[in-house]
Amino acid sequence: MAAETRPLRVLGVSASPLLSGAERVLLRCARLGGRSQEARWTIASPPGPFADAVTAEGIDHLPLPDLKLGQGRRAAAGARLAGNNLRAAITLRRLVSRFDVVVVNSVMALPAARLGIPRDVPVVWLVHDVITRPDLRRVVQVSKPGVTLAVGVSNAAADLPARLGMETSVVRNGVHSPAAPCRPQTDPPIVGLNAMLTPWKGQKEFLEAMGLVESPVEIELLGGTFPKDVDYERQLRELAGEPRLAGRVRFLGHLDDPIEAMRRWSVAVSASIEPEAGPLAVLEAMSIGLPVVVTNHGGAPEMAGKVGLLASPGDATSMAEAIEQLLRDPDEREDRGRRGRDLIASHHDLDRASDRFAALLGQVVAGR
């Protein structure tokens, strides 16, 4: 009788206590790996909403210090971060002998992994960012010797590690497919944006664009607010109260099932003014047949460029023109929505993406 193969033991490491797109991807990897019984995951992260979601899924969780740069004076925040990295490295060194492979889920967790994980333990960096900031590039450069494989969620995300000479692969983000189709409200139609309310996601620019749209339309902003961005939310609400937008903008906040709210929309917009690697909200919109308008940088054009419309980042006029084009042509909306669903089924199915990532983890371990 052949010996039974035990599940791969995987330690996921996340820098942030918050639950946003990158953390959702890691949680999905852990959930699907555990259900297939091919891997047993444990996730280490700071206490907070992400940790709560991990334990709610029945996945083992271990606490780490917060590895994001905190608020306050930069020097003091930097000193706290350095101390937290050292404490996290000590924790990881104690834990790592129990695991076959470590998955680092963010740039800011790389230094702790570099310090705490021995070189004989394979480390896979799941790259969720298009890294343009010089300070983050330096973090990656210093951490490079500790990374066995960098896995980008798009070609745009994989670009920097590849140029730095890292072993690199691409596993594009995925969503559930097929999904129940959208049921747009038609009188008046709704144009919506699904993202945390934070400046780089471009809600301000989106509202400015909607102020230029002539077609009758309602506007919805879907997403919660980080504590550091309460002033930004206040600015958005003030902008929404201006005469050109007054009475037409709804702030939905965080919803446990955002896709159900999006099914009422006629157009979904991703307005990020900094490049995103592979925004899940765009994939989720396409999965239900929503036509999308995305800013033309990062991984969004890779995902939606063939079926969506592209707008110049930070350009309200460009975005307004793309939105207006879709609002004025129901047949085009239907056609682009249908092709978006087909693209999700063929290139962004969650089960296939998870299987591909799990196979890479197995290959990395076998290669050691």
Image (cartoon, grey):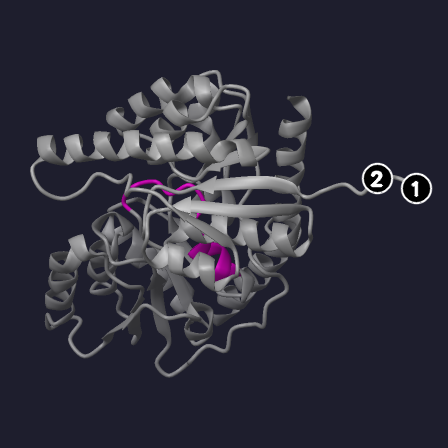
In the picture of the structure, the residue carrying the numbered disc 1 is: 1
Q: Residue at x 25, y 35 (%)?
A: 84
Is label 1 in a helix, a strand or a loop? loop
Q: Position of residue 169 (x, y in %)?
A: 57, 30
Is label 2 in a helix, a strand or a loop? loop
Image quarter of the N terminus = top right
Q: Amino acid at mark 2?
A: Ala
Q: Toward the viewer: 252 or 346? A: 252
Q: Residue at x 59, y 50 (%)?
A: 348
Residue 351 left/right relative to 277:
right
Tag on residue 39?
none
Image quarter of the C terminus = top right
Q: Is residue 198 magenta?
A: no
* Real-space Cα separation, disc 1 to disc 2, in angstroms: 6 Å
Residue 158 left/right relative to 45:
right
Residue 32 left/right relative to 286:
right
Tag on residue 3?
2
Q: For mark 2, does the 10 Å Cα neighbourhood hold few (<14), some (14 to 19), or many (20 or more) residues?
A: few
Q: Toward the viewer: 259 or 263? A: 259
Residue 291 visible at all: no
Q: Position of residue 331 (x, y in %)?
A: 52, 69
- In this picture, which residue range is highlighted in magenta? 273-286
